[in-house]
Each structure stands twice: as C-alpha cells, then as structure tokens.
C-alpha cells in the first residue's frame, strides 16, 4: 500500500471528557484521535516507504499536519466555485501539506468551456479528475490536456509562489 485516505474523523463522538470506564485508554476523544493517527502514520512508515496520507476537510488543522502528507477539499460536486473556495481556504492553513481539489466530474455532454472552468478553479491546488477519459470528446480532452499542461508547466507559481487571496466574502474572485 502506498497510501491511506483517512475520512470521517469529524464523525467521532466528541465527549470531552468521555464517560468514565475501564475500557477507556485516553482522557479525551481528541487525544484518542491523535493517538490513532500517530499509530497509523508510524505503522505505514515502518513499511519502509514514505506513506501518502490524505486528510479531508473539515478536519484539518495544524495539529494534524504531522499525521498527513496532503489535505483535500470537502465534497463539492459540480461546483467549481466551491472547489475554489475550499482549496483556497485550505491553502491558507495547509502549512507544509499539499492541497488537493475535490474530484472534478462532468457529464459526457459538458461543453469544453465548462470543463476548463472546473480546472481553472482548481489552479491553486492539485487537480483531481474523476471522469472516464476514454468517454470524453476530443474537445473535452483538449481542454483537460491544456489546463493540466498549464498546471504542470507553471506549478512553481500557483503551488509554491506567494499566496495572497483576497475577498473571501466574494469567494476569492479572480479579479
């Protein structure tokens, strides 16, 4: 296994302190989650490879950085604007971690311009495409190739350059 996607941490019942009982091995749920993630990380690292560990919104914070190598936007199906907002929000708190956009998908009939809109809105994160590329039209594939090529060629600027988004009240507009 090269990596692990850790999901639904936000669904753990948070009772601080938890009910007393002999089965409890942590004082709080927060401590238990931290110990669980640390043990998962250590076991994966013991395999001899640097593990790929993904955490996802909304449970991302600097306290969890040491347990992950990337964080991903929460689900925002078919919403380029939400994907942009969530990835920009993550970039602001991601520290050393890579930020991945939510999986992008579109119907087979989607116009290439709309495919491009989805990719453009994920320029400040690692784009993830979740469509069957063998079922895309030549025009859709051209849009995907162009924007993934753009991201690859210019990655140093949007991924590692000075990042100063503005107007969160307007969902970080491009102008």
Image: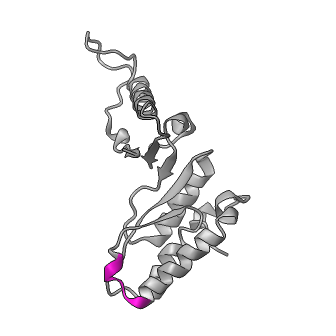
Relative image position of residue 33 (x, y in whole percent): 40, 29
Residue 166 shows in the view? no
Please determine whether, in this image, residue 139 is positioned above or below residue 170: below
Q: Is residue 157 magenta?
A: no
Identify the main secondary structure in magenta. Answer: helix
Quadrant showing the N terminus: top left
Q: Position of residue 34 (x, y in %)?
A: 44, 28
| Residue displayed at 60% across by 61% down | 168
Highlighted magenta segment, given as a residue range: 133-138
Question: Residue placed at 62% from the left, 45% from the top?
Answer: 96
Residue in view at x 68 percent, y 57 percent: 160
Horizontal arrangement in the rendering, residue 119 relative to residue 109 (left or right): right
Q: Name, please, the residue furthest toward the top.
A: 22
Q: Quadrant of residue 104?
A: bottom left
Residue drawn at 58 percent across, 59 percent down: 88
User: Is 80 on the left or on the right of 97, as rendered?
Assistant: left
Residue 98, how many percent across, how many down?
Answer: 56, 52
Q: Position of residue 61 (x, y in %)?
A: 53, 40
Quadrant of res 15: top left
């Amino acid at each position: 296994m090269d990596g692990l996607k850790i999901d639904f941490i936000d669904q753990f019942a948070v009772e601080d302190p938890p009910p007393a009982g002999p089965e409890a091995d942590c004082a709080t749920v927060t401590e238990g989650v931290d110990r669980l993630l640390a043990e998962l990380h250590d076991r994966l690292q013991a395999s001899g490879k640097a593990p790929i560990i993904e955490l996802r919104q909304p449970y991302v914070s600097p306290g969890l950085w040491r347990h992950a190598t990337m964080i991903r936007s929460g689900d925002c199906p078919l919403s380029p604007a939400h994907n942009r907002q969530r990835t920009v929000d993550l970039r602001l708190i991601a520290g050393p971690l890579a930020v991945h956009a939510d999986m992008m998908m579109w119907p087979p009939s989607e116009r290439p311009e709309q495919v491009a809109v989805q990719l453009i809105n994920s320029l400040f994160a690692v784009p993830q495409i979740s469509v069957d590329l063998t079922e895309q039209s030549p025009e859709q594939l051209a849009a995907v190739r162009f924007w993934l090529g753009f991201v690859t060629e210019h990655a140093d600027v949007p991924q590692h350059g000075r990042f100063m988004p503005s107007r969160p009240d307007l969902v970080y507009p491009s102008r």
